[in-house]
C-alpha cells in the first residue's frame, strides 16, 4: 500500500503545484499510515521533492514525452501506481492533470474526485470534500473503488515543508503508437505573461473600463504585482480582450490568493468562477454594485483615478518591501 | 461522419443553489434547467459539420424523463435524433459507461462532450468515455476541424494554447471557442415544430455501477461584510498587514 503523487514539471523544473500536491499527499499518507511515492516525468532534479514529504521518486525519462500526451502520461502514472500497489493517487487540477485524470481513472478502475478542497474526512470509507455547482456549494463525495484518485484544487492546501531525503529510482515505461494518437503540432504560450492558472494574484477588469484602449493601466497594475490579467465575459465577447482571459462560471475558474476586480458589477455567473479566491478587492464607482457583497475590501471610486494611483503607490511599496 | 453530442441537463447559471433531505439532494424547486453551456458550444459546432460536411448529429443524455425538454431543445437547434438512457446519472463513471454502449451501438466517429458540467463539475465524463472506447481524446478543445479520418484541434492549456493532430474515432471535451457566443442558436418556431416530430428514443441502461457518490452538500459559509476604504494607502496597508496578500 502507498500513496502516489504526480508531480508536474515544465522544461525539467517542478511547478509550484507539484509541491502543493506533494504536501497534501504526504498528509493523506500519514492519515493512512503509509509512505509517499512521487512519479515525475522528464524532471531534471528531483531532490526538491524531499522538502515536501516525498519518500521515493520514480523518475520517468523519455524523449517521446517531451510534448504532453494525455494517453501516454496516464499510462506512465498508471504503471507507477501498479508498481507501488497504490491506494490513493493525488494530482493537481492543471489543464494537463485534468486531461489525463479520467484516462488514468479508467486504466486503474479507480473512482476520481476532482476539485477537492480539503484532506479526506475519513479514509475508510474514503470521503473527500469537493466543490460543486461551480463553487456555489461543496459536496462530500465518497469513493468506493479499491484505488482512488484525488484532483486537488489549486491553493486548497498550501505548502508544508519538511526535511527528508527522497530516494530516486529510474522507472521505465514502454509505449506504443496508440499512446500517441494525439500529436502536438505547435504550442502558443505567452511566455512573458503569468497565466491565470498559475497566478497568485489576478487583476481583472470589466465593462466599466469602457474600451480596450484603457487596458494599459490594468496591465501596468498587473505587472507591478506580478499578477495575471483577467476579464469579465462581455469584455471577451466584445473582443476587447482574448477569450483565454474570461473568468467565471462559463470561463476559467480563479483560485488565486488575491483577486482585484475593477469595473466589474459582480453578476452571479462571474462570482461563481472566483469564489475560490482568498482575498477579494473591488474597485467600482457604484456603491450598489453587487460585487461589494462578495468582497473583502472595496473602494468606491472611479477606476480611471484609483487604478493609476494604486499602481504608483504599490510600486513604491514593492520597492520598499522587496 | 456520424456525430454524437453529449448533453448534460443543468440548472441555469442564475439559479440559487439549495439542498433538501438533510442536505443530501439538490433542491430543484423553481430551478430552470438548460443545456450545459459547454455542450451548447459543441452542439453548435456539430451543426456546422452537418451543414458544411453532411454529418449526421445525434444527441444523448443519461437521465430520467425530466431531461426530455432539454433534449427537445437540442433537436429544435437542429440535431437529427435524441437518445435518452433511462437511468439517473449518479457519477461520471457510470454515465461514461452508459455512453460507451451508446457510442458502440451507434458506430459514431466523433463524440462531442463538454469540458465540464456546471452542476457536477466533474470534468470526467469525456475522458473516461474516450478511455473506455479506446478513442483519441482532446480536452478543453476550442477549435476543431475534421477532414476525412483526420482531425486538427486546438486545446487550451495553462497560459496559452496548443494545436494537435489526431484521427477519428475521437472524443472531445469542448468549450467556448468551438464556436463564438454570437454563433449560438436560439431555437426558432420552425425548429421547435420540427423537433416535435423528430425521434427521441428512450433506451434502457446496461446497469453500469457508479464508483462514487455525493453523500451530502453544504453551502460556503456566509462572508463577513466588506471593508470599504477611502484611500489607496489604507488599502495597501490592509492588504499587507491584515490580509497578508501582498
Ligand atoms: C449563461 C450565462 C453565462 C455567463 N457566464 C459568465 C462568466 O463566466 N463570467 C462573467 O464575467 N460573466 C458571465 N455572464 C455575464 C454576467 O451575467 C454579466 O453580464 C457580466 O459578468 C457583466 O460584466 P461586467 O461586470 O464587466 O459588466 P457590467 O455589468 O456592465 O458592469 C460594469 C461595472 O463597471 C462599473 N463601472 C462603470 N464605470 C466605472 C468606472 N469609471 N470606475 C469603476 N467602475 C465603473 C459599473 O458600476 C458596473 O458595476 C454570463 C451570463 C449568462 C447569461
Ligand atoms: N448525464 C449525462 N448525459 C449525457 N452527457 C453527460 C452527462 N453528464 C455529463 N455529460 C457530458 O460530459 C461533460 C462533462 O461532464 P462532467 O464530467 O459531469 O463535468 C458534459 O459537458 C456533457 O457533455
Image (cartoon, rainbow, N blue to C red):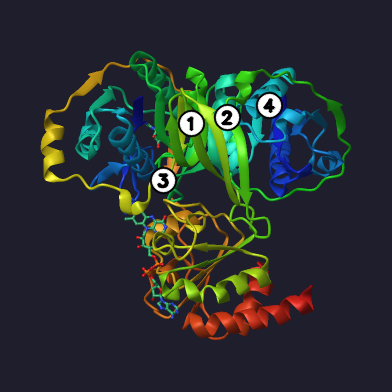
Q: Label 3, label 1: how many angstroms apart (C-alpha)?
A: 32 Å
Q: Which mark is residue B151?
A: 1
- Vertical side of B174 occupied by A241: above or below: below
Left or right: B246 as drawn, with respect to A126: right
Would you say the residues marked 4 and 2 are in contact, meaning their CB atoms lie under 8 Å apart? no
Label 4 is found on which chain of the structure?
Answer: A
* Residue at the (27%, 22%) spot, across then down: B86
In which quarter of the view is residue B207 placed? top left
Measured from the top left, where is residue A257 in percent x and y? 62, 60
Measured from the top left, where is residue A198 in percent x and y? 64, 53
Q: Label 3, label 4: how many angstroms apart (C-alpha)?
A: 29 Å
Would you say the residues marked 2 and 3 are in contact, meaning their CB atoms lie under 8 Å apart? no
Would you say the residues marked 3 and 4 are in contact, meaning their CB atoms lie under 8 Å apart? no
Q: Which mark is residue A182?
A: 2
Helix, strand or loop status at disc 3: loop
Which residue position holds label 3?
Answer: A133
Q: Which mark is residue A77?
A: 4
Numbered label tally = 4
Amino acid at each position: 500500500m502507498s500513496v502516489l503523487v504526480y508531480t508536474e514539471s515544465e522544461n525539467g523544473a517542478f511547478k509550484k503545484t507539484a509541491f502543493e500536491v506533494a504536501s497534501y499527499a504526504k498528509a493523506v499518507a500519514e492519515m493512512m499510515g503509509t509512505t509517499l511515492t512521487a512519479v515525475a516525468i522528464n524532471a531534471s532534479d528531483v531532490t526538491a521533492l524531499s522538502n515536501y514529504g516525498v519518500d521515493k521518486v520514480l523518475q520517468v525519462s523519455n524523449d517521446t514525452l517531451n510534448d504532453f500526451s494525455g494517453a501516454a502520461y496516464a499510462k506512465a502514472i498508471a504503471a507507477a501506481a501498479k508498481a507501488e500497489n497504490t491506494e490513493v493517487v493525488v494530482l493537481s487540477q492543471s489543464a494537463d492533470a485534468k486531461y489525463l485524470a479520467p484516462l488514468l481513472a479508467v486504466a486503474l478502475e479507480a473512482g476520481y474526485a476532482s476539485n477537492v478542497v480539503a484532506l479526506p474526512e475519513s479514509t475508510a470509507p474514503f470521503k473527500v470534500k469537493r466543490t460543486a455547482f461551480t463553487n456555489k456549494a461543496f459536496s462530500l463525495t465518497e469513493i468506493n473503488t479499491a484505488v482512488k484518485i484525488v484532483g486537488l484544487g489549486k491553493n486548497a492546501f498550501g505548502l508544508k515543508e519538511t526535511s527528508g531525503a527522497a530516494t530516486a529510482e529510474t522507472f521505465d515505461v514502454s509505449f506504443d503508437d496508440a499512446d500517441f494518437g494525439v500529436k502536438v503540432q505547435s504550442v502558443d504560450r505567452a511566455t512573458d505573461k503569468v497565466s491565470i492558472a498559475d497566478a497568485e494574484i489576478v487583476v481583472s477588469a470589466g465593462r466599466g473600463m469602457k474600451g480596450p484602449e484603457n487596458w494599459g493601466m490594468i496591465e501596468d497594475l498587473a505587472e507591478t504585482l506580478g499578477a495575471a490579467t483577467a476579464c469579465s465575459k462581455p469584455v471577451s465577447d466584445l473582443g476587447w480582450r482574448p477569450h483565454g482571459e474570461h473568468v467565471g462560471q462559463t470561463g476559467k475558474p480563479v483560485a488565486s490568493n488575491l483577486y482585484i476586480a475593477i469595473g466589474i458589477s459582480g453578476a452571479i455567473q462571474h462570482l461563481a468562477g472566483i469564489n475560490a479566491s482568498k482575498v477579494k478587492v473591488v474597485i467600482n464607482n457604484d456603491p450598489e454594485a453587487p460585487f461589494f457583497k462578495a468582497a473583502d475590501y472595496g473602494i468606491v471610486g472611479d477606476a480611471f483615478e484609483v487604478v493609476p494611483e494604486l499602481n504608483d503607490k504599490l510600486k513604491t511599496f514593492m520597492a520598499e518591501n522587496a | 461522419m456520424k456525430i454524437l453530442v453529449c448533453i448534460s441537463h443543468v440548472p441555469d447559471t442564475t439559479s440559487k443553489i439549495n439542498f433538501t433531505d438533510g442536505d443530501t439532494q439538490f433542491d430543484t424547486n423553481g430551478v430552470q434547467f438548460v443545456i450545459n453551456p459547454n455542450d451548447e458550444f459543441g452542439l453548435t459546432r456539430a451543426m456546422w459539420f452537418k451543414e458544411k460536411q453532411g454529418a449526421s448529429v445525434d444527441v444523448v443524455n443519461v437521465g430520467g424523463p425530466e431531461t426530455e425538454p432539454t433534449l427537445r431543445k437540442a433537436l429544435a437547434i437542429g440535431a437529427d435524433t435524441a437518445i435518452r438512457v433511462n437511468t439517473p446519472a449518479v457519477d461520471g463513471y457510470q454515465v461514461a459507461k452508459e455512453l460507451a454502449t451508446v457510442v458502440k451501438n451507434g458506430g459514431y466517429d466523433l463524440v462531442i462532450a463538454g469540458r465540464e458540467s456546471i452542476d457536477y463539475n466533474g470534468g470526467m465524463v469525456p475522458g473516461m468515455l474516450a478511455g473506455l472506447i479506446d478513442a483519441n481524446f482532446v480536452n478543453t478543445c476550442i477549435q476543431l476541424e475534421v477532414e476525412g479520418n483526420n482531425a486538427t484541434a486546438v486545446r487550451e492549456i495553462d497560459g496559452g494554447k496548443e494545436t494537435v493532430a489526431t484521427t477519428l474515432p475521437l472524443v472531445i471535451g469542448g468549450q467556448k471557442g468551438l464556436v463564438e457566443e454570437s454563433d449560438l442558436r436560439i431555437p426558432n418556431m420552425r425548429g421547435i415544430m420540427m423537433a416535435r416530430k423528430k425521434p427521441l428514443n428512450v433506451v434502457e441502461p446496461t446497469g453500469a455501477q457508479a464508483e462514487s457518490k455525493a453523500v451530502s452538500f453544504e453551502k460556503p459559509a456566509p462572508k463577513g461584510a466588506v471593508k470599504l476604504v477611502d484611500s489607496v494607502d489604507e488599502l495597501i496597508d490592509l492588504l499587507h498587514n491584515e490580509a497578508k496578500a501582498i
